[in-house]
Amino acid sequence: MRYNWNWAILVTEPYLMWMLSGLLWTILVSLAGWVLALLLGSIVGVARTVRQPVVRAIAAAYVEVFRNIPLLVQLFLWYFVLPELLPPAAGTWLKRDLPYAEFWTAVVSLGTYTACRIAEQLRAGIEAIAGGQARAGLATGLTTAQVYRYILLPVAYRIIVPALTSEFLNIFKNSSLALTIGLLELTSRSRQISEYTYQPIEMFTAATLLYCLIALIVAAGMRIVEKRSALPGMITVEAR
Amino acid sequence: MGGFDLAYLTAALPLLWEGMQVTLLLTLFGVVGGLALGAMLAVLRLSRARLLATAAAGYVTFFRSIPILLGIFWFYFLVPIWLGHSIDGFYAALVGFVLFEAAYFCEIIRAGIQSVRRGQILAGLASGLSYRQTMRAIVLPQALRNMLPVLLTQSINLFKGTSLVYIVGVRDFLTAADVIGARDNRIVEMYGIAALVYFVICFAASLLARRLQRRYAI
């Protein structure tokens, strides 16, 4: 094995800035996707537990569709197929005029995919709460919305915090798929620089360590959230 | 975008099927290799030797922290330096899948074994069974029943995940669809078909996993 080691490549311009900007895009796309996933996942998760069969069926269909198609295929559907199916004006806007199209596509794709997983966790969390609590709430005159707002959701979210931790970690890892649509995130940048410089070991080591660092920070942050939100005497549930 | 016709799809079928065979092969090897390595890791994680248990836990944490795509790149770009010639993306991806899946399978197996209550092991030992007999007759049969649906779900995840080989140019199902779509200017139809086929297979398999769980879970 002949290899010209050159660790200094990591702090050489412009590669250092490229890696940092890659890291920034990874974080941005993951966080934005996470916000969308939490919002959408909460709506779908609640919809899976309400009494109206039509609403439940739509929410279940959402979960099955997004869970059973590979994320990479979903990303391609959003990026390549959606603009073709829209009215021409909207399609052209998506393809040509939308600034940061790769970023927004990745956010929507990661968000809608992760939402189906969060929805399943939240449903499991809501179902883990004894039915008597919801009935007691209704009996005391709360509306259904109030029962969710004040009784079910506060407890359900706290039950699923550990499960959310691994989803939060997953979205950072999954964001690497966005390199296929041209988003210059961390994995993409490390590959690009190693192709330019023939220093793949240094670049991939740096990327690996940065992902580990993200994972450590996510784990530490979520541990604080877990501690603060833990329900005394409650077991936690994790949906698959 | 031309109209969709059945004759066109029929013409594309052989190439798609070739791709699907690669996808299935990657999934099969990945599951078998991942299970073997994962089972070893699980044994280490549950062993009393503190050092081995910590090392196995470290392996799991490490591989769960980084994107599998980065792992595939490691092998794809590194092995050529090591061997002096490039390797097929298939093998780079396969090594990546086995190493990464092992971490997930390890956790599933460990959780399955730990789902059997400790009192049962103690009861087995107290009734005169040896440790091996207790494991074989009491713990593992129950652990397997608990693990089975989760293992299937994880295998479905790998089946979906093998689509990542697209990035290193392996002709799997997704790549085949992509190549045909690009060649004939039918990207919309081919991606649509790819999504549909993945959905049907994964949905059917996940229904099976749910049935297994209802039937076998303790």
Image: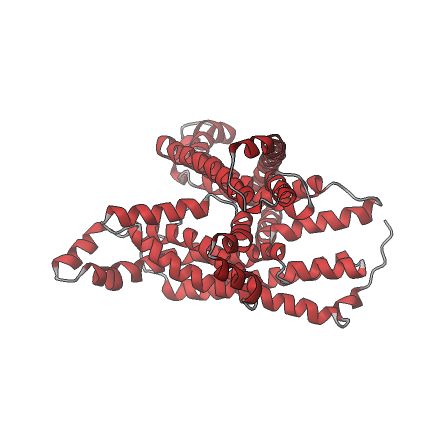
Determine the image quadrant of residue A210.
bottom right
Residue B155 in sight here: yes
State whether residue A88 is above or below residue B147.
Answer: below
Left or right, residue B148 beside residue B47:
left
Q: List x then y, in percent, for residue A163.
A: 43, 54
Left or right, residue A82 beside residue A139:
right
Q: Residue at x 69, y 44 (%)?
A: B169
Which sits in the foreground, B187 or A28?
Answer: B187
Left or right, residue B18 beside residue A115:
right
Colour option used: secondary structure
Which sits in the foreground, A155 or A39?
Answer: A39
Find the residue positioned furthest to the right.
A2
Which sits in the foreground, A118 or B99?
Answer: A118
Q: Residue at x 45, y 66 (%)?
A: A224
Give the number of callouts: 0
Q: List x then y, in percent, for residue B20.
A: 59, 34
State whether residue A213 is above or below residue B22.
Answer: below
Q: Residue at x 30, y 53 (%)?
A: A47
Q: List x then y, in percent, for residue B40.
A: 60, 38
Q: Residue at x 50, y 37 (%)?
A: B197
State whether residue A127 is above or below residue A10.
Answer: above
In which quadrant of the rendered image does the C terminus of chain B lie?
top left
Left or right, residue B177 beside residue B74:
left
Which sits in the foreground, B139 or A7?
Answer: A7
Residue B46 in sight here: no
Q: List x then y, in percent, for residue A109.
A: 50, 56
